[in-house]
Image (spheres, coloured by chain):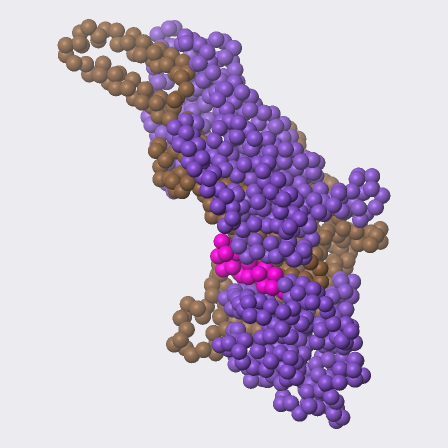
Amino acid sequence: MAATQQEARSCVRTPERTNMASVNSSEWRAICDKFTNAQNLTEIESRNDKENDPFRSKYKAKELLREIYCSLKNFEAGEGEEEGGGESGDQRPTEQPVDGQREDLFGQGFSGDSPAGLRAARLGAVEYYLGVNHVDTEELSAGQEHLMNCMKLLERCRVSSPNVSLFIQVRNQLGILWAGRDETETAQGFLETAESIYQRYMKEDGSPPTDMTEYFAAEENLLTHQERIKRFELAYTHTMYYLAQVYKNLGQTERAATYCHTTLQRQLQLNQFTPMEWALNAATLSQYYITKGRYMEGRHCLSAATVISDLAGEVPSEAAAQENETESERREHLRQKRAEIARCWIKYCLNLLQDAKKQLEDNIGELDTDRQEELKRARRREEEEEEKGRKSALLFGSEDTFDSIASIEEKVMCLFPLDFTEARSVFLVGQNHVTQAKDYFQMDGYVTDHIEILQDHSALFRSLAFFEEDLERRCKMHKRRVDMLEPICNDLNAQYYLMIRRQLMFELAETYNEMMDLKLALANRQADTQSLDNHTIKKFNHLCSASAKYFQMFLDSLCSPEGKFPERLEEEVLRPALVARFRVARLHSRLISTSPTVQLDNLNKSLENYKYVVQYCEANPEAGAAVETELELSKEMVGLLPLKINRLNARMDSNN
Amino acid sequence: MASRQVDIRFSSSLTRRESADGGRLAVQVEDKFVKIRNVKLDGRTEGAVDSREKLLEFCFDYCYWSVDRADPHYASQEEVFQDLGVSVLSGASEGYNVCLFAYGQTGSGKTYTMMGTPDSMGLTPRICQVRWLINTQLSFLEIYNERVRDLLKGGEQKKRATLRVREHPEKGPYVQDLSSHVVSDCKQAIDLLEEGIANRITAATHNHDASSRSHAIFTIQYTQAILENNLPSETVSKINLVDLAGSERADPHYCRDRLTEGSNINKSLVTLGIVISALAQNSQMSSSCQSINSVASEGDGSTVGSHSSSLSGGGGGRRHCFIPYRDSVLTWLLKDSLGGNSKTIMIATVSPSASSYNETLSTLRYAAHARNIVNKPRVNEDASVRLIRELREEIDRLKSMLLSFEMQRNPSPSLSDERDGNLSEIVLQNELKVTQGRHTCLHLPV
């Protein structure tokens, strides 16, 4: 508050009377020059300010703006106008400012092009620029004060083409300011008013509005209609963009997503975007839709991202990158962003497959053919509705991009794949993007990213395997998963990549388990006899031990550096650790052996692990809730296994 | 030692503004609790305000009151070192990565705590004073505007080149081309520390004469000989001392949670991506909040307990997506220090003066929030439905076996004579059948 009062006082009234109306007067020219200068300092020179003096140019601009303010005041005084709102800072109520708009911003007050209206707008614009400048230089309270002064000046005017842009932009700035203070509702008030001002103006007037910079431009420098529209629309795009953030902060996710979408669409339509940034944003938005299960929108965003990212141009060659640092950075940037978009596509394919699987599986995780038929029938009905659905959805596109976006959309389905052929087509699209993403995110340099991509690839195989009827081929798909994950799991530094390794261990254990089950099922189908041949038994035992080995490795990773297993499991590993114990117990009891000694040994190991689960949950009762089923079964086994062990012992004794 | 610990220290440094309002204290410390008086409500009439609103309370692992040396509760540098410095060193010698963060507004005594003055050494030089073990290496870097600079390269560095952050499968996350300095005694270490500090970027603004706007990471890495299974072995310990920037810029969520302005100059809406990312992330969180805890039994509403029914019943389930938004360089570099195999200690310094209310509150909130910053591991369990079903079948078999065994022990009178003699044989036969059954239970559940 103090800042403005001081500025106001520091304006020295010059005795001579100046007429502002004479736009060609030298005083007015001087003001215009100062303004141009201030703009230049703020927008261009400030970018070159040194790190230890970051606001140098903005401070200079601030001085110029203050001078302009004083000069304008003088013009005003010279014309005998009453004092402007700019000096009424001391009367402001201490309440938090809200957008104290009148009932009807469009109906009352000075017309925008009346002399009084124009003066108010000019002073308001200077207050606006001063406000933005203070905010930029981390003096928020002073910034707020200037922006509110601008609001006050505008209160006396009615919304019309000479001032509507200022009406909106000052509210945008106040919105940012209040949101920065976590006063989201206050911000929301300003921004929603800005939104409604725009909408009403476009409905009732719609002529290309004056840009604020034109208040201080010589007649020959006025903007074309086209340029005016562009700037005005950009201001409104910002309103949309800020509202998206406000709604996000208020937790209104759905609404926030709509505003993000609108922002992107406006950028595209008005041709105000940088291609790669836009593409990445659209790709990210697709991920929002995917988590909501809205695959049509997700696919649309991704297709648009792919099309627009191509507008960013060719990736410079490696040779070009080596010669020139700018090219090298550009190469890096383009490759990275394209790889990131590819990763968004992977997630699309993966989630679509996984969701389809969830729809189709029966209560033991196998394909439910009745359900499959039912869904196929339902889809035939849906397909007829699809066209209608499309029209109501939010779509991206300008005239020249619409078709290319549609042709990319055609390459992958957005409905749930219901049989192997369909699943495979989705899988293949995903796998293509895996290759593309891995090309940039290589192991050396991008360990975490690279592995995440491999994990997705493995998950793609897993989902595809669900649709595969041939057990032999299904088993091979799981083998592919093992082949891609196993070497990495064993080579990674155990300390730096602890989390990743734990995930990999668990996944490998599960995969081996799955293969083991498949081998058994295959053997069962092939032979009607009750006996297993040695080769199959060997294979089965190998898979069984491998699975147990990785669960055990997971458990070992929980040990302290001295190799002690923790007495209390941390919450985030509680369930996985107990489940791993439970699984190890089960696997040991499944190993096939003809030797009673080995059998006994396996059963004892099994019992020991079941006992651990039971005893841990007795000692830490709250753990029971996390592993309800496993605990129940472990208890049973702890009761029953000793019987089995005793009999085996008895038999061994009697045989001896 | 808990793997994450948050401590608060109240400092004695008086800034200009504090002296102006008489240094009125707005904060009380009781044991591990910090209570801060809500000065925003001061002007209001007594009855109108709920008493709970007047005092905000935060709990920390340690609280130090270093405002007035005459105060009986005054916590000296030595005391802070004994608690925090010692736990840093012991954590490292146990083989953990240790990370000590310092956070607080400019003028709240952060530098005093971390560095100290010549006659009152802070944590860093005290940590440097411990006896060096084999091969101690130091590096010192700064992160300014998401760019990494080496603070110990002196004149060699051309145009303040930015360094690239990478990950190596064996060596973990690292800064490419960051200089590493072997030191053999404490003096060398402190000299390097001071050289680096002098190279940090500070900025003069109307608000601050010299506020540090960058994060700095001072890394001590040393090798120690240990015996592992009675064999001599070496273990590498790493200590990161992190000085976070002296303003809200230090908050890694700064950009995410706030509105940021879209520049009118170029067409870039820089943070739109961040907003969209947050949306995707939030909705991912809400559908996967139980991430590791109830995944196993998913899809099997019939056989498992209540914890999974919310997942299988909801229809949607969890969907994991990719957020193409890079972590801040700081988070990225320290990811192995935030959870898992590491110990993290955070010290937040705040000024007790009423005029610093806003900053103090935001520091306290940030520090309280920091307790929850963990790298949570996500382990994906495949559906173990089949396994559970098979196990149930086995349990049933074992039970019926038990039952038949029981029947034979208490046989009905008419049968007893016949069977009593060869009980063990029957048991054996039963067992054989069962084991056989186990081996050849080959049919796939349909």
Question: What count of labels does the image hold?
Answer: 0
The prevailing secondary structure element of the residues shown in magenta is helix
| Chain A, colour shown | purple
Percent position (x, y) of residue B332? 64, 47
Percent position (x, y) of residue B64? 55, 61
Q: Residue at x 64, y 82 (%)?
A: A114
Q: Quadrant of residue A120?
A: bottom right
Residue at the extreme left of the image, as rendered? B414
* Residue B221 visible in the snapshot: no
User: Which quarter of the rendering shows the C terminus of chain A?
Assistant: top left
Q: Residue at x 37, y 14 (%)?
A: B437
- The chain drawn in brown is B
* Residue A596 visible in the snapshot: yes
Whether residue B310 sits left or right of residue A342 in the image: it is: left
Percent position (x, y) of residue A503? 55, 35
Q: Is residue A86 above or below residue B429?
A: below
Q: Is residue A53 above or below residue A596?
A: below
Whether residue B56 sits left or right of residue A212 in the image: it is: left
Q: Residue at x 49, y 53 (%)?
A: A254
Examine the structure image and report whether residue A528 is included in the region drawn in magenta.
no
Q: Which residues are magenta?
A: A235-256
Q: Is residue A432 above or below residue A265?
A: above
Q: Residue at x 79, y 76 (%)?
A: A33
Examine the structure image and report whether residue A243 is included in the region drawn in magenta.
yes
